[in-house]
Amino acid sequence: MEPFIGLVKKELLLARYWYLTSVIFMALIFLAAFLLGLRYDMPTAFVPFYILSMIFLLFFMPAMLLGLLRVEGRTQLWLYNPQPSSLLLLGKLAAAFLFQLLSHLLFILAGILFNLWLEKHGFSPRIPIGEAFSIHLLITGVAVIFSLWSAFLWTVYHSLGKYPRLKHLRWLIVSAIFLLYCYIESRVMKLDFVHKWMEPSVKVSGTPSLNFSGKGWSVEIDHMPISVGGLIYFILLSLLLFYGASKLLDKKVEV
């Protein structure tokens, strides 16, 4: 356990300045949106900026992971690390995941502070923080899937670098692999027994909708159906992607 904790600490230290930069960037966006709302006498103008900015969270973890992998590839230190590749990759995933969770907490804190400010100035809360928890949970799950796909395709791309004839076609091959997967998945999902297995069986709050009225912008959280079969499928897919990326890294390919 100690080697793993050490790896995670190393990745957190490595990525701390990237993370701080992203937090400052998002804080400036929120501040600009808030000040614009005050300037044009529409305090709730912050709401659509807040909701749209959550798209940033979908790609934050994959971008952080790719950044860490890129540094590892540039230094080549992982080639000489005695730890298994699965542990090295898991350390990077864990660090990116922790930063992802911290980002969600900061988003929720910003929403709470904004709601308190609205209440203080006679407005009703415009961002339903309690119901928004489900949205943050769903975004985190999607970000994890994106991250594992990013790690797998990254390892495929650099593994192909061993073959001179394929080196200049790597982007094309990686794109073809992903598109082929999407095509096969779409065909399989149309099969009757698979379609039935993937039918939604649980409803959670997870679909935000922006509304504008004379009182300004507000958010309503609608219920979204979730398939237990789909959840199991994505868990298995995540494990397969992680296994595939780890196996490719085990070959100690120079990147």
Image (cartoon, helix red, strand yellow):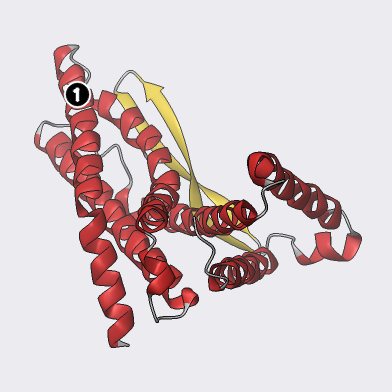
> Residue drawn at (38%, 59%), measured in percent from left and top?
72
Q: Residue at x 82, y 53 (%)?
A: 184
Seen in the picture, residue 109 relative to 35 is either above or below; the reply is below
- Residue at the spot x=25%, y=46% of the render? 18
The residue shown at (60%, 67%) is 248
Would residue 214 appear left or right of 146 to someone viewing this image?
left
Point out residue 242 in the picture as x, y percentages from the top left corner: 56, 69
Instruction: Identify whether 111 is placed above or below 159.
Output: above
Question: From what the image shows, is residue 204 above or below residue 177?
Answer: below
Of 82 and 93, which appears nearest the observer? 82
Along the line of sight, which residue is nearer the eye, 176 or 204?
A: 176
The residue tagged with tag 1: helix, strand or loop?
helix
Give whichever of 111, 144 is nearer the camera. Answer: 144
Residue most extreme to the top: 40
Across and down, in percent, residue 141 comes to 49, 59
Direction from residue 124 to residue 134 in the image, left or right: right
**Disc 1 residue type (three-letter):** Ala
- Identify residue for label 1: 32
Which residue appears farthest toward the front when viewing the image? 164
